[in-house]
Structures are given as structure tokens and as C-alpha cells.
Image: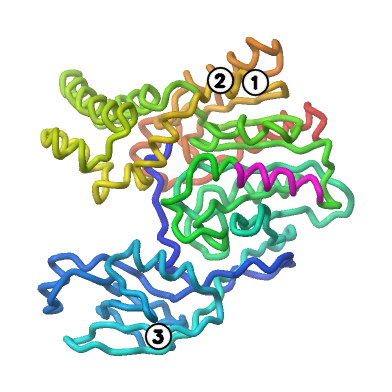
Amino acid sequence: MIRNWKLVIVASVLSIGSAGLSQTAYGDDLKRRGMVGIRLGPVNDEAKQRLNLSSTKGVLLNGIIPDSAAQKAGLLADDVIVRVGPDEIDDVPTFIKTMRKYGGGDFLKFYVIRAGNEVASDLVLLPRPMESATEYDVVYDSAGEPGQRVRTVLTKPKDAGKHAAVLFIQGLAPNTIEFGTPQPNPYRNIIAELTKAGFVTMRVERRGVGDSEGLDVQDTTIEQDIASFRSGLKKLSTYDYVDARRVFLFSHSSGGAIAPMVAQGTPVKGIATYAAFARPWMEHSLESSRTLWKLELLKDDEINAKAAKEKLFYEECFGKKRSPKEILAEHPELKEHTAPFLQNDTMIHGVHYRYMQQLAGLDVAAAWAKVDTAVLTLWGESDYIASKTDSELVAAIVNRGHPGKATFVAVPGIDHGFNQAEDQEESYLAEGAVSFNPVVIETLTKWIKVQGGS
């Protein structure tokens, strides 16, 4: 599920340094996005009063990264960006969308409000730092047709010859899947350990994220995501260091909803999932919420009351395809309940409600029923976000049509984010502040080798 993942606003850079020494290859001319080197925030009422502003338009600079483009341009903390070149900046989403027009090396003029006056600053964007590693090679490339191209990042062992390969399909949150900066990312260890185990890996940046084309990830649709991963899968088999007969998919969380659809049209040796869902999204989501409320030690009557409100919201949003704003106007009693997961009346757990409606509209079970290849469904016993039932169901659906093709494995001591945790309660209390558990890689690589992927 998408909830409980910390979303990173790429434009408000937390780091701008190099990632280390390794061989990193850049294989295409897809524009490298630029970095400003700032920490952003909205201009809320508190900031408006403190800075004596006339409105809440613009974005507030909460901090400037040392040695960044912003520092070199003379931008300061508490500046409020109101215009970039010819583009007016109303809020954080507007700023991010505007900055996606530009790349590293581009010259821009920033207009900020400082101490009540408008100040213009000349700024040259620095390119985003590229991912690197010491134990394997990193290759930057792209896939897809012009206008729909997406950034692909591959890792490959240093030894020569053809290798089995894994296309990784991440959870479908609007986060970058690139590791050029030291920002925490739960997938960093997955990619590193798979590569050190001898596999080529590929990641695909969603449209509107990172270097991929598209100005706003919130405009990206499920169908576009499926097409992007399909183009990546098709490209993966063409590299001279990849054995096209031994290509696998590995998906996480909501990425498992599209994994069987990505595999349609391009043969794969096998599909593995971790923390997948197969039931209707609303059913899956409500069960996840109930598990969370139990961990919060709510009483049964409190849980039932909250579940009734959440079900009503989901029925209106996912079933009737209404916007959260419309729903709350008609059902103001839901405002308090939806406040923890609904942002700006448009974002549900950090994802645009239109995309969530599309996700909820997928017939995931029917897609898995069409799969005729080896399948491994993994579920961590300490995962309180995804359920065991869904991963078991994926395996059952595949085996119903193709007996013996699918295997379900419950993995002990690991939670939704691949972290070590004795049980769901420990994972909940730790809030992700624990260490990576390599058991998922050990289980996955053992299965891949059994399928002939060694």
C-alpha cells in the first residue's frame, strides 16, 4: 500500500554532494534535471504574519544548502519565491512543475520577496548528482517514445558475460527511484544486494519524476505507468550484458498491481512480488486501516466507527469517482477522519485522488489469472500495511489456471519497508527507524536460481 511512505519533494533538495566513486555511464541525451539546493515550505498564515507579507502566494525558503546553486545566487532563508523567469509561483506544486522545464546548466532569474521588497537573483542550475557505487557499475539510459521517454537506471556486476536481470517495479508513489543523493530510500539496499548477488537490475522513473519527461507526476495515469515499465522491460533484454532468456520482474507494494500487466506482451522468466494486493483496493485498504487502529490500541467500537467513515469516503471517491472536495462538502462529518491522510483536498496518502481512483478501478485478480510463468509472492510477517491474504490470493489465482506455477512464502522478521522487526507492533513503534533485513534478497535470489536464473 502507498500509505506511511515519506514522500520526497525532489525540487527542494536535501543534498547536493557526490555519492562516491564508481563507474557511472550516461547512455542517452535525456535532459538531466537541475537542482536549486533549497528546502521549501508553503507560505502559511504564520509565515505571512512573521514576514509581513501581503498574501500567501509563493514558496518559502526554509533553508539553503551549502555550495548549492541557490547559495551561489545569493538566495537566503525566509526569501519567498514569487516568480521564476516569466512564470508566476503560487505554491509548492507550481514551483516544482515550473522547475521541471529546466535542466542542469540552465540560467534562470528568481524573483523573491525579501524584507518587503522584490529582489531578482540570477541562478544557474546545477545538475542533479548521479548515482554511483563502488562494487558494481551504474548505467543511465532511457526508454519509451519521444515525448514519453522515461529515465532508466541500471546496475550491473563488474564481471563480464551475460547476466540474469531483474526489472524492479516500485510502489506507485510520486518519489524518485534514483539514489544520487543520500536521502533515505528503502529500495537502495534492494538494488545493491541484488546486484552484488550477480543480477543486472533496472529501475524506471515514472513520468513526471526525475529526468523522465512530463511536467507533473500528478498528471501521470496508471496506463502510462504500465506503458513506461513495459518500454523498460523491452529495452532491458537488448543489452549485451543481459541474458534475454532470464529476465524477471520484482515488484513491491502497489507496484504489484501492475506487475502482471507489465509482463503482458514481453515474455519473462518469472514474476516476484513483495507485499502485493489482489483484492479490490477498498477492501484491501480498509483491512490495512483496521490493523493500524488495533496497533494504536483503539477499542472495537472506535475501530468500527472509524471504519464506517472511511468506507463511506472510499465508496464516494473510488466507487462514484467523486473528488474529496465534493465528498467533504456533502459529508462534513468526514473532515476530522480524513485529515491524517488527505492533503489539500486532492492528495490521498501523498498520491493524487485521480490516480488512486484508477488504482482502485484495476481488476488485479483478472490480470494475475492471465499470468503463465513462475510466480513468487512474498509477505513479511511484521508487515502491518499489506496483508498475508492478498499475497496468498495472488498465488492461488495463478495456480488455479496454471497449477504449480506460483509459490507463496511468509518471511519472518521483516516489515513492509524491508526492515528488521520482530512483529507488526515493533515495526509500528519503530516507524521505519530500523535496519534492512536481507532475508528478502536471500529468499528471492534462491527462487530465481531455482527458475534457472543463476
Packing grade of label 2 (10 A; few <14, some 14-19, many >=20) is some
Q: Are marks 3 and 1 in contact (CB under 8 Å)?
A: no
The answer to whether one can see residue 24 in this image is: no
Report helix, strand or loop for mark 1.
Answer: loop
Residue placed most toward the observer, 250 or 136? 250
Amino acid type at mark 3: Lys
The residue nearer to you, when weighing 261 against 19, is 261
Between the residue at mark 2 and the residue at mark 3, the CA separation in whole angstroms equals: 52 Å
Residue 217 is inside the magenta segment: no
Per the image, the residue denoted by label 3 is: 109
Residue 443: image location, x then y, percent:
66, 31
Q: Is residue 151 above or below residue 440?
A: below
Question: Which residue does the image show at 59% across and 42% down from the upper left?
Answer: 169
Residue placed most toward the observer, 435 or 60: 60
What main secondary structure does the magenta stretch of the protein show?
A: helix
| Image quadrant where one finds the C terminus | top right
Alpha carbon of mark 3 to alpha carbon of mark 1: how far? Answer: 53 Å
Residue 237 locus on image (x, y percent): 79, 45
| Residue underneath mark 1 | 370
Residue type of the residue flagged with mark 1:
Lys
Which residue corresponds to mark 2? Answer: 366
Secondary element at image label 3: strand
Colour setting: rainbow
Q: Residue at x 58, y 27 (%)?
A: 378
